[in-house]
Amino acid sequence: MKTSLRYVGLDVHAETITVAVADRGGEVHAVGTIPNRPDPVAKMVRKLGPVERLRFCYEAGPCGYPLYWQLTRLGAACEVVAPTLVPTRAGDRIKTDRRDAEKLARCYRAGDLTPVWVPDAAHEALRDLLRAREAAKVDQLRARHRLGKFLLRHDRRRPAGTTAWTRRHRQWLATVSWDRPALEATFLDYLHEVDHAADRIARLEAAIDTTVAAAPAEMRAVIAALQTLRGIKQTTAATIVAEVGPLSRFRHPRQLMAYSGVIPRVRASGATVRRGSITKTGNAHLRRVLIESAWAYRYRPSCTGALKKRQIGQSEAVQALAWKAQHRLCGRYRRLAARGKMKPKIVTAVGRELLGFIWAIGVDVESTSTAV
């Protein structure tokens, strides 16, 4: 049975799918191009043979996972692969849909492709919502910069002792007046964009609260447990869970560190080993929230106020890991700072170790949920 498997590479676009097949031990050949619609896909599966013999793969991309879900519903085995890890030939300057599909089928048959984790409906919905909030935060920053630079060009400075974008600052903006209608219109437009961005973020954060409360129990448990760590509140914890999925799918925390792209580049030849900057080849959304959280560990260990409230109801093992993280990561920050390292490099190193504690807490909670 194993010798009769057929490996199918799919080059997927919004409107078309180019199909190529690699029979085990045989030649790789293109089948053709079909519309990217459910009926043609189902017809293609029937045409290629018994579904239990077929192994499909395609690259992760903007088309998402509907094709994956359709193929699995039809009973076919399908994997979505990481496009950046597909082997490429040096000097190959010809790229077509047919050649891409054939390369996927050939590499899939050889076992040279790396599958990615496909989120379920709950993870994907939460991830899209959190990414929408992230985009809204970027838009808010841009809107604030536009207004701030406009005021600076016209020498309108906020009162001394006033912090930017606080309530007092907003009250001062309401009193700013202009002697020219054009400047007044420009100012009001910039101010409206700032207020609109704030309202947009508030709506999205309310939606995040509702979504997390309605999430599956296993997901809620991990999100709540991760908040015992300093610097990780609900939005950050939900981002980690939505982007990574089950933390127990990583056998070792180093795999999670590699997935986030915070491990250093290494070039080794003989006795020479050179380490460079971080790879940044992993999940950028996970890496962003990780580095933001790592800044909290520059302060001495403490557990008061909101952090103590977030730890209520968590197991002693989880709380012990969170307290150990504070001591270990704060100590690492201070040791690296004493050696004269730059703060961004220190925080990156701290964030890399923080992932180890995130993995440990997630695996502990997931194993407990599975046992129950």
Image: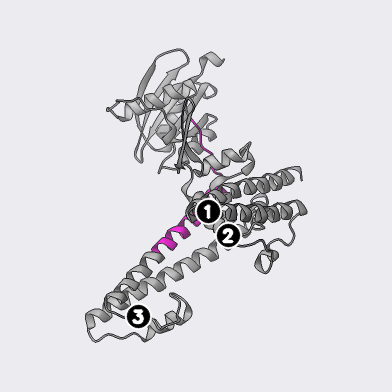
Residue of label 1: 347
Q: Is residue 245 above or below residue 146?
A: above
Q: Is residue 19 above or below residue 320?
A: above
Residue of label 2: 298
Query: Mark 2 is on which residue type?
Result: Arg
Give the number of callouts.
Answer: 3
Q: Quadrant of residue 89?
A: top left
Task: Give residue 136's position: percent from left, percent from top.
Answer: 43, 62
Instruction: Give the mark nearer the N terminus: 1 vs 2.
Output: 2
Task: Give residue 347's position: percent from left, percent from top.
Answer: 53, 53
Query: Mark 1 is on which residue type?
Result: Val
The residue drawn where x is 32% and y is 78% is 188
Residue 185 within the segment the image draws in magenta? no
What's the coloring here? one colour
Residue of label 3: 157
Q: Is residue 119 above or below residue 340?
A: above
